[in-house]
C-alpha cells in the first residue's frame, strides 16, 4: 500500500514539534529563522513537488513547460502526454525540431529560437494545406502552440511564406470552405488560441 504524501503544512507542523530548538511559540511562528537559506528556484521546485500529489496514493498530477524560470504551461499528465505525442508527429511532418525538450522530472525546457522557427513553419504548413481533414486535425495543435508562443513573447509570422512539399508530394482534397482571406484566417486562428488559453493553466 502506498502511503499518502503529507501536505507541506502538515509536514511543517511535524517538523516544528519534533525539532530541537524550535519549542517556543515565536520559533513555531517563524520556523524559517531556524532554517538555512533556500534559493528561490529551489523553493519553487519544492512547492511544485508538494502540489503534484493527490490524496489517492501520491499520483503525480501535472507537468511544466518552461523557458528558463518562466512557466508557460502546467497541464495534467494526460494532456501533456498527448501534446508531446503531437509534437513528435509535427516535427516529422515539417522536418524541423520543435525546440520543446524532453520531459525530465516533470519539467520541460523550451528553446525559444528553435521554437519560433517551428511555429512559423507550422503556421505556413497549416495555411497551405487544402486537405479538409488535415486542416481540422491540426487546428487544435496549432492553437495550443500559439498560446505557448504568445506567453513566451515570441512574435510569429502570419504573412504567407512558401513551405516546400514534404517529399515532393502534396495532399489534395476538395478545398476547405475556410475563408480565402489571409486576414480572416489569421483572425479566426488567433481567436481560437485566445479562447484555448483560458483553459491552459500556468
Image (tube, helix red, strand yellow):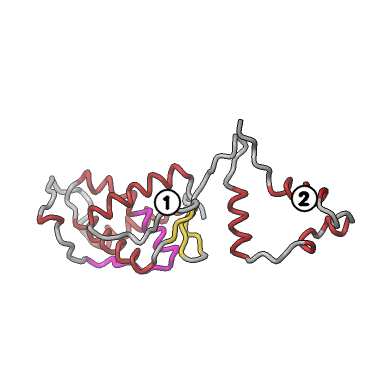
Q: Residue furthest top?
A: 1
Q: Quadrant of residue 82?
A: top left
Give how far across and how far down residue 184 sits, in percent: 27, 59
Residue 111 seen: yes
Apparent side of residue 21 relative to residue 101 in the rendered image (left or right)? right
* Residue 192: image location, x then y, percent: 37, 53
Residue, disc 2? 15
Position above or below: 165 against 174: below
Pointer 1 or 2: first along the chain: 2
50 horizontally vs 162: left or right: right
> Looking at the image, is mark 1 or mark 2 nearer the viewer?
2
In 3D space, how far apart are the residues under numbered discs 1 and 2 (Cα atoms)? 42 Å
Q: Is 127 in the magenta? A: no
Q: Range of the magenta residues?
A: 143-160
Magenta-span inclusion, residue 155: yes
- Residue 177 location in percent, x, y? 20, 48
Is any atom of residue 184 visible in this view?
Answer: no
Q: What residue appears at the point 35 percent right and 62 percent down from the top-left corner?
A: 99
Residue that mark 1 sits on: 196
Label 2 Cα crowd, 10 Å radius (few <14 / some 14-19 / many 20+): some
Pick the front one: 115 or 22: 22
Identify which residue, 152 or 31, lies in the foreground.
Answer: 31
Amino acid at each position: 500500500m502506498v502511503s499518502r504524501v503529507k501536505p507541506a503544512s502538515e509536514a511543517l507542523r511535524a517538523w516544528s514539534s519534533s525539532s530541537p530548538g524550535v519549542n517556543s511559540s515565536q520559533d513555531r511562528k517563524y520556523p524559517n529563522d531556524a532554517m538555512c537559506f533556500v534559493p528561490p528556484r529551489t523553493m519553487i521546485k519544492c512547492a511544485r513537488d508538494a502540489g503534484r500529489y493527490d490524496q489517492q496514493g501520491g499520483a503525480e498530477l501535472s507537468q511544466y513547460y518552461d523557458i528558463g524560470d518562466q512557466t508557460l504551461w502546467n497541464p495534467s499528465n494526460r494532456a501533456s502526454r498527448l501534446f508531446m505525442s503531437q509534437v513528435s508527429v509535427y516535427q516529422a511532418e515539417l522536418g524541423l525540431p520543435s525546440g520543446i525538450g524532453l520531459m525530465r522530472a516533470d519539467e520541460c525546457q523550451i528553446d525559444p529560437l528553435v521554437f519560433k522557427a517551428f511555429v512559423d513553419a507550422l503556421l505556413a504548413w497549416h495555411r497551405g494545406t487544402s486537405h479538409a481533414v488535415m486542416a481540422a486535425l491540426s487546428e487544435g495543435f496549432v492553437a495550443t502552440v500559439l498560446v505557448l508562443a504568445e506567453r513566451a513573447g515570441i512574435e510569429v509570422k502570419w504573412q504567407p511564406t512558401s513551405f516546400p512539399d514534404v517529399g515532393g508530394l502534396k495532399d489534395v482534397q476538395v478545398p476547405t470552405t475556410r475563408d480565402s482571406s489571409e486576414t480572416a484566417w489569421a483572425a479566426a486562428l488567433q481567436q481560437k488560441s485566445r479562447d484555448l488559453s483560458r483553459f491552459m493553466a500556468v
